[in-house]
Structures are given as C-alpha cells and as structure tokens.
Amino acid sequence: MVTAMTDHAQLASWDRDYFWHAFTQMEEYEPLIIDHAEGVWLTDTEGNRFLDGISSMWCNLLGHRHPGIDAAIRDQLDKVAHSTSLGMSNIPAIELAKRLASLAPGDLQHVFYASDGSSAVEIALKTAFQYWQQCETPRPEKTQYIALSQAYHGDTLGSASVGGIERFNGIFGPLLFDVTHLPTPDPRRLPENIEPNQAAEYYLAHLEKVLAEKHKQIAAVVLEPLIQAAAGMVFHPPGYLKGVRELTRQYNVLLITDEIVTGFGRTGQMFACDHEEVVPDILCLGKSLSGGYLPLAAAITHPKIYSAFLGPATSGRSLMHGHTFGGNPLAAAAALATLKAIEDEQILAILPDKAEQLAGHLAKIEQLPHVSATRQKGLIAAIELTSAPDDNRPFPAEMRVGARVCQETLSRGVMLRPLRDTIVIIPPLSISAEEIDLLGNVLYESIDIATQQAASTLTSCPGSTVS
Ligand code: PLP
C-alpha cells in the first residue's frame, strides 16, 4: 500500500506531470497505479483488485509473484545483477540459451539476446541482411523484405518498417524503408468467389507471385505465425504458415517468425510454429520469455545462418549488433524459472481444459445481440462487436465501444484492453477455473451493457451514421 508521504492523489499528480505513458493520450489519461499483485490479481493504490485479463500487456505468463520465479531472481541477485554479453558471458544466460535451443522448433540453436521484442525483430532483420552479404555464395542484392499488411513487430524503425498498421506507423512513413506488404491472410476478408477452405491457397498465391518476381532481391519474409496480434488477433487460415515455409525454401528466401506474443504455450503449443511443424530460419521471442517479469527477448538462429558469421576476429563477419542489457542474468534467471515452472506445473497439459472452459463462455457471449463473432486459439481469444447484427456493421469508431466495454469490465474488477472494437482476452496461463468463470461472466455482462447503451445512442440520434 502507498505510504502517507505518497498517497494516491500525490502519485496521480506526479504520474500525470512526469510519466509520459506509451500509446496514451496524456490529456485524457486517468492514473491507474498498481501497488502490488499476486497470481492473476493486480491491486491498485486505492486498494481495488483487478483480474489481469491482458497478462500485463500480453507478457505475464504464470501469474504475478510466482514463488519459483521470485526465488530465482532473488537467488541470482545474491550473485550478480548484470554483466555484459559483449565478448563474455554469465551462467543463467548460457543455461537459458541451451534450454531455448532444446525447446525451439527443429535445430534452431544460436540465441542472440535483446531486452525487448522490437529489438529481437531488428536483430532478425539485420541477421538476414548480413547473412546474404557474407554467406558461402553471397547474394548482396538480397536486401529487401516481405511482410504482412496489418502486421505489428514493434516500434523501432526497422521493426516498424516491416509492420503494417497505418495508425501506429503512418506518421513515420518517411523514415521507414520500403517493404513489400502482402494482404493480411484473414479468412474473413476473402473475395466472394473464394471458398473459406481455399483461403490459405488464395493468400499463398499472393506470396508466390511476389517471390516469383522479386526473390533475387528478397532477404526474408517476416510474419507473426498463426495470429496477428495487434491487428486485432487475426487468425490465419490453417496451412498458410506451412505454405509460406515451403515457398520461402523454394525461392531461397529466409523465414523470420515473430513469436513475441504467441510463444510459450499461449496458443496451446509451446510455439505457434509447432502447430504446423514449421522450422523458421530465425525465431523471435520476447514478452513471456521471462514470465513477463523482466525485459528479455531473443532471436534464435539456425546453424546454417550462424555459420556465415564465423571467421577470424579481423574478418568483419561478426553480427554487427548488440544491446547493453542483452542476456541480463536476472532476466535469464527469471526465464529459466519460467521454463521450469511450465514443465513442473504441466502448464501445456492442463491448458486444453482451460481453453475449453473459456470456449464455453465465448459461445454464450456470441449469443449477445451486438457480438458478431468470437475466435480462440489456446488462451488467446477475441470478440468482435457490431452495431447492426443483421449485416455485421461495426459501431462508428469515434464511439470507442471497445473501450467502453473495457471500462465496464474494469468497474467489475477485470482488466482488459481492446484493439479498437475487438475485445482481446489473453490471461496468464495460470488462471484458475473460478477465475475463468469470473472473467467470462464479467465480460458477458459488460459487453451487454456497453453495447446496448451505444446502440441506443445510435438509434436516438437519427442523424448519426454507421460506417
Ligand atoms: N512483435 C509482436 C508480435 C508484438 O505484438 C510486439 C509488441 O506487442 C512486439 C513485437 C514488440 O515487442 P516490444 O513491445 O517488447 O518491443
């Protein structure tokens, strides 16, 4: 709890005056200040408790104050908090690299650490670029990338260049490099003459066309496998990822998969790539890697790529990249403890029951008049709202109905964050059966209230338009 010196009002005022928050309009910002947490529960400075339905921005994996992770960080703190990974090493970072290599798809092996997901993507992009400059048969003209429309890979300029969400990156357009963006492989957006079971084939044809034309210039394809998270939890058609892997092999182009959101069991398998038995050339991890405790990310590279970076110190072949805190021992210790807990607590084995329970709630929610669709993979789910159930029209964006729903859930003790009018559910995998029921029931009630209110405003203002 806060002390007399720093009561809530004082903290809120400092928060507004000094702390510039990410992706937040500070003029409208209402401080919500977390004081402590336990399991899936966050407690604010006014003593309110919230179920963390967004895993503290998609990263907390096994709950807050997990005893094993807490202890691992404390133990490591008694040894060393930080030492550099430039030209030297530390014990937890070595052990973690070995463990990640054993878990990662196929024979991915070489772990390059960063502190955030955007940097892991930068590493992957630069690795791919440098690889083609100095591999056994160099292809220096391979300097370009293919990515997906509506992709989100982070906010640094390289990761933003391969991103495709206009409202995040549009203003920085002149700073970004050119990337070929393919249509988002979204089965809901197919042309009328294409059947849903042809979705993968349809979207793969776009990739094949671009590769046929430009493969000699393309260094890599980069994508979020199976689920495009920030796009609104868009689910790709089954078979798309596998098809991308086949085409990239066929056209001698590297495949970078960004599992910064999907990694570590959230989709029901350890990695999204595992659903389609795909082994990328470079795998990016972040967020849940440290249990969502400490800043840690990684790009894991195939030996075939890595070997092109070997040579004498004077050869200039080293990867020209590095982060001060990459391989931080405290974060690595948290990650090792997280991986141990996933195994000890059989997190993946008990996930199907939790996913099924959540599916039951989604089925009920889908019956609400202003819900057009729900979708789910593992413990990642999304709910789409509609103003006009008959023809699935969205609410006008300026009504911010998704935000209104999440205000309603917050007032009932469940913290969620929408992506526009898509309500996203991504709780820690440690969530209990009772907590899933609470989450589902609160969501049902909140969606019902917020959407009915919004819809009644629309009908009572005949001049209002629904776009
Ligand atoms: N990649 C994906 C798929 C993401 O969703 C995010 C962040 O949400 C990132 C990369 C960037 O990670 P970070 O915010 O840690 O830089």
Image (tube, grey):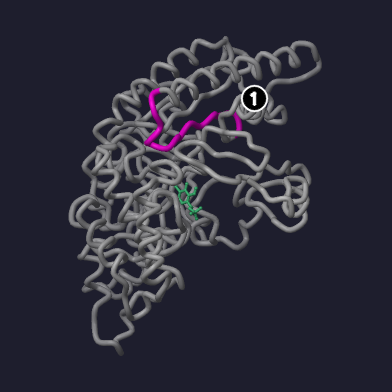
What residue sits 56% from the left and 60% below the top?
Answer: 176
Residue bounds of the magenta highlight: 420-433
Is 347 positioned to the left or the right of 446 in the image? left
Residue projecting furthest to the front:
4
Element carrying mark 1: helix
Q: Nearer the viewer, residue 303 or 201?
A: 303
Q: Which residue is mark 1?
A: 408
Position in image of residue 421 (x %, y %): 59, 28
In the depicted structure, whether residue 35 falls above or below residue 360: below
What residue sits 29% from the left and 27% below the top?
Answer: 352
Q: Nearer the viewer, residue 12 or 158?
A: 12
Position in image of residue 399 (x %, y %): 71, 27
Query: Which quarter of the picture shows residue 297?
Result: bottom left
Is 217 positioned to the left or the right of 231 in the image? left
Is 389 positioned to the left or the right of 65 in the image? right
Q: Which amino acid type is marked by label 1? A: Glu
Query: Which quarter of the picture shows residue 357?
Result: top left
- Asked if residue 432 is among those painted magenta in the image, a careful observer would answer yes
